[in-house]
Amino acid sequence: MIGVCSTATVVGIIVYLIRQGIWERYIKPLVSRKPKLSIRFEDEMDVIHIQHSQPDDIEQMVASSMNVIQTEHPYERYTMPSFENPFPQLFERDSTNKRIYNDQLKEYYKEKEAEFRNIHQGTIEDGFMKPLKLILRNDGNVPSGKMNIVVYVQPTENVYISDARQKISADTVEPPICIPEGAFPILAYKREPYSYSKWDFSKCIQEQLEFSKDFLNHQSQDDSLLPVIYVDTRFEQKVSISYKIIDSTVLEPYSGELIVWIDETEDKIKNIHKMAIHNNPVSVIYNDTELITSLRNLSLNKKGHLLSKAYAHTFSFGR
């Protein structure tokens, strides 16, 4: 009987504490002390949307840069000496210098074009490679123990880490100098160094990445352990980044999934949303984010019509 009364008393006390809010505020944090581990994107999001990109025209970029060079260093005009020239040696020497200068200038143009192509190509590639920083977080109320972390990436095509980006050093010839009336032509032998970036698109990320860490303090994060992941935004796709964290102080592993969408859906849906508001503002009940989520959850064909019953009109998209 005493045991029953004691149990009833304890239950009664707990119920009282819960009703008074004391349990949630003071007692529960003490009896449920444990780490809360997760991996998030840098902006603390689990799902991000990236606009599908179209690379710039490299030929136009190279041509624009070469126009500047050719304006600063134009070809020299010269005329061949005539037989009636009373100073044939002087004019012959002058025309020879200019011919040599123009030949060197031609090689200079050729090397500068290759330099501009390398630099602009690297800039274009860096532009469509979107970096995604992964953050290891502990939002719990105690430090973690030793952790083993496994990150899975699917698909691995068009997904990379920083070792696929190379920094290449090269050099190009300096512009030649022409002295029209000099005794000898000045040859251009000096070279100028430059560097450019280049992505090795054959080095896709591994499907499984493994890491370890001794501990992570509570209410803190580590932004240096996990690699920066780069996605090629030229290709429309969904990238799944799932993870499992095994903590030596916790029985069950922590797991989760991050999603990256690369497509043009956002702009299309926003345009549809604006059209729907214009045609029937009362019936529109979704914001852009909800529409994007609804569309993907429904897995509608990209040439489908109605996004939801909120739209009484038919809008085609993706055509």
Image (cartoon, rainbow, N blue to C red):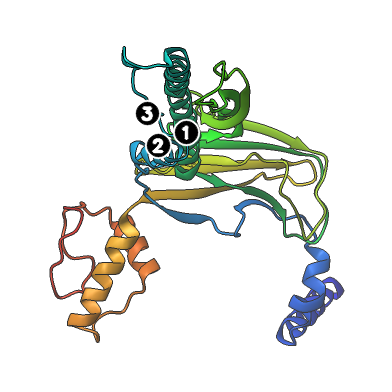
Vertical relation: 177 (above or below) 304 = above
Say which element carries label 3: loop
**Dot 2 surroundings within 10 Å: few (below 14), some, or many (20 or more)?**
many
Q: Residue 88 vs residue 3: left or right?
A: left
According to the picture, the residue beneath numbered tag 2 turns out to be: 62
Which mark, residue 172? Answer: none
* Residue 185 in view in this figure: yes
User: Separation of disc 2 and disc 3 at Cα?
Assistant: 25 Å
Q: Position of residue 74 (x, y in %)?
A: 42, 34
Of the residues under marks 3 and 1, which one precedes in the sequence? 3
Is residue 310 visible in this depiction of the protein?
A: no
Q: Earlier in the sequence, mark 1 or mark 2?
A: 2
* Quadrant of the drawing holding the N terminus: bottom right
Q: Nearer the viewer, mark 2 or mark 3?
A: 3
Q: CA distance from mark 1 to mark 2?
A: 6 Å
Where is residue 62 drawn, in percent x and y? 40, 36
Residue at mark 1: 116
Which badge, 2 or 3, comes first in the chain's sequence? Answer: 2
Which numbered marker is on residue 77? 3
Determine the residue positioned at 16% across, 57% down: 304
**Classed neighbour count for the residue bearing mark 1: other residues with Cα under 10 Å, few (<14), some (14–19), many (≥20):** some
Residues under numbered marks 1 and 2 in contact, where contact means CB atoms less than 8 Å apart: yes
Q: Tell me which amino acid carries mark 2.
A: Val
The residue shown at (15%, 76%) is: 312
Quick one: SS at disc 1?
A: helix
- Whole-Å distance between the Cαs marked 3 and 1? 26 Å
The residue at the point 75 percent across, 47 percent down is 250
